[in-house]
């Protein structure tokens, strides 16, 4: 029987999580859940110089918001911990030693200034087979010299010795067979002078120790793959290696190049999952969450960036994605990001979502806009009336503020050109009728009846209801938007309706 599927997301905690990163998490997660496997979060924090405070917590918060909870992680625990590489330092050295003993790696004693001098001398210098012998390492130096340097604790790193004339070949689930000429790749550092492994050694050792069966990551890691494949071959055997899939890039809207944080800033859309505040510059980059996306929609749109189920279906719940996901339907080419389409997904999810649940999500926006909600049930009802018109959660404010307080700015300019005494009389009569209803104890009337009364009154005044609808809407809402006019009247009730009509009639008469 095949081993239990175990996949990992292995971010370096260096800042906000790009939507491409979340899509990598998602594909890992869906694959794991589809196969009853386990999804592991491993924090790759061996590069202390890139440490960013708060970045790990941000990743955890983002996964929680997206509903992509790991089975094992630094906070969820698990049988293969620790799940932070900085806490696994002791594990790596023995593998570096093994590689040296086997002749697959070597000590390099070059100082930073040695390397700088070499870079100045040779354009595009690479520490590789071509220049290895010109440098200070355990291949170029004699055994005695090396021994003496080690004995004196001379600072050194361990580098992989990339083989000569070897093709590194592996099978990528998405791309098929991938080949690299090993001699074009430099001798990457595996263990740094501080005893910390680099990403290359740590990723292979940990994938092995954590029994990872499938490793899926962004296409930007493809150039590193030959180093990883060789390390697998030297340390654990290729038959032990996880199956690889390098996921296609998410491209700029015009399809030219990878979508970057800067593109988002330039074009006015989020690229990070959630707001990220740089702890040093204090600069905040907006996230999908804070922009007003629902996590369900964010997940749905990410899944469809580079994958489909073979039909035209576009709206998927997490359960449906888990049931339908398969890597052979992931496209090889990059997927263009289309923000309008992303908003469409959100709108579709807003339509589906339960109004009560939406009310909890939009409440903070109402608080922010200082709109007081006196009755929770009223908010839930209004949400039902306007949700079809909302793409993002803050749209609920623009689309429904007038249900909670009368508009302060009224677009009378759109009424004035066709305004006439007949219409003025009509609205005065309407106020009269509503006032009679109020006196008879009615606060409101169902929308259907309101519409019927309105039409009858229009006929009586020899006006077409069509000519009266736009002015009426503007009187109630302030502008040319909103749900059905009579639904609005029913919700804001007769007294408020009369006040708004009268206020507007006054404005029109003083114009
Ligand atoms: N630590 C790498 C990153 O920051 C992980 C690459 C991989 O999954 O192998 O994305």
Image: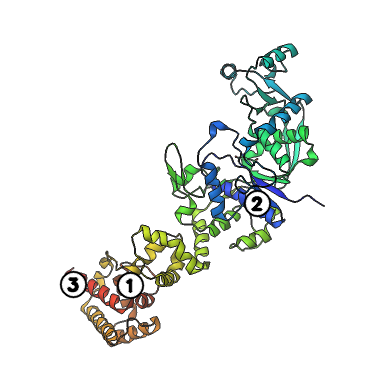
Nearest to viewer (mark 2 / mark 1): 2
Query: Is 107 situated above or below 353?
Result: above
Give the answer, above or below, for where 318 lies relative to 183.
below
Question: Does residue 129 appear in this view?
Answer: no
Q: Quadrant of ligand 1?
A: top right
Residue 120 placed where, x, y %? 56, 18
- Disc nearest the viewer among 2 and 3: 2
Residue where numbered disc 3 is placed: 509
Tag shown at residue 473:
1
Mark 2 and ligand 1: say if the CB distance to the nearest ligand atom is below 8 Å: no
State the residue at coordinates (56%, 54%). Answer: 66
Report the side of 23 relative to 381 (left or right).
right
Q: Secondary structure at mark 3?
A: helix
Residue 112 image offset from top left, x and y in percent: 57, 19
Label 2 sits on a secondary structure element that is loop
At 32% from the left and 69% from the top, the residue drawn is 477
Secondary element at tag 1: helix
């Amino acid at each position: 029987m095949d081993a239990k599927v175990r996949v990992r997301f292995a971010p370096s905690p260096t800042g906000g999580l790009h939507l491409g990163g979340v899509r990598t998490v998602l594909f890992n997660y869906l694959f794991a859940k589809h196969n009853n496997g386990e999804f592991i979060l491993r924090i790759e924090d061996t590069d202390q110089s890139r440490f960013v405070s708060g970045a790990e917590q941000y990743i955890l918060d983002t996964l929680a918001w997206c509903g992509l909870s790991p089975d094992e992680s630094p906070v969820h625990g698990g049988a293969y911990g620790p799940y932070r590489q900085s806490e696994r330092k002791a594990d790596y050295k023995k593998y570096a030693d093994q590689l040296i003993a086997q002749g697959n790696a070597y000590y390099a004693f070059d100082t930073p200034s040695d390397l700088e001098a070499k870079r100045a001398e040779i354009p595009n210098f690479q520490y590789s087979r071509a220049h290895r012998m010109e440098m200070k390492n355990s291949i170029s130096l004699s055994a005695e010299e090396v021994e003496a340097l080690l004995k004196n604790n001379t600072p050194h790193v361990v580098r992989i010795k990339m083989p000569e004339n070897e093709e590194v070949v592996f099978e990528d689930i998405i791309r098929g067979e991938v080949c690299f000429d090993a001699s074009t790749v430099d001798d990457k550092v595996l263990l740094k002078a501080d005893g910390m492994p680099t990403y290359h050694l740590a990723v292979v050792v940990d994938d092995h120790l954590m029994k990872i069966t499938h490793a899926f990551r962004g296409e930007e890691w493809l150039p590193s793959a030959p180093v990883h494949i060789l390390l697998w071959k030297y340390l654990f055997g290729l038959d032990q290696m996880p199956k690889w899939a390098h996921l296609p890039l998410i491209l700029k809207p015009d399809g030219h190049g990878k979508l970057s944080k800067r593109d988002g800033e330039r074009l006015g859309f989020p690229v990070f999952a959630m707001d990220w505040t740089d702890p040093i510059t204090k600069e905040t980059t907006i996230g999908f969450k804070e922009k007003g996306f629902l996590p369900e929609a964010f997940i749905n749109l990410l899944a469809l960036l580079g994958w489909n189920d073979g039909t035209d279906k576009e709206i998927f719940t997490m359960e449906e994605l888990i049931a339908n996901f398969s890597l052979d339907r992931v496209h090889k080419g990059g997927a263009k990001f289309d923000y309008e389409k992303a908003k469409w997904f959100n709108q579709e999810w807003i339509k589906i979502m339960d109004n009560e649940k939406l009310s909890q999500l939009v409440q903070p926006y109402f608080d922010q806009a200082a709109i007081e909600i006196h009755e929770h049930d009223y908010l839930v009802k209004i949400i039902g009336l306007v949700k079809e018109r909302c793409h993002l959660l803050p749209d609920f404010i623009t689309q429904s503020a007038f249900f909670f307080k009368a508009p302060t700015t009224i677009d009378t300019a759109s009424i004035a050109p066709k305004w006439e005494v007949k219409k003025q009389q009509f609205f005065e009569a309407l106020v009269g009728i509503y006032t009679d209803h109020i006196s008879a104890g009615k606060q409101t009337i169902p929308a259907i009846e309101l519409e019927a009364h309105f039409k009858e009154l229009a006929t009586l005044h020899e006006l077409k209801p069509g000519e009266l609808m736009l002015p009426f809407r503007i009187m109630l809402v302030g502008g040319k938007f909103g749900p059905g006019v009579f639904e609005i009247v029913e919700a804001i009730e007769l007294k408020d309706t009369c006040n708004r009509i009268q206020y507007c009639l006054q404005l029109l008469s003083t114009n």
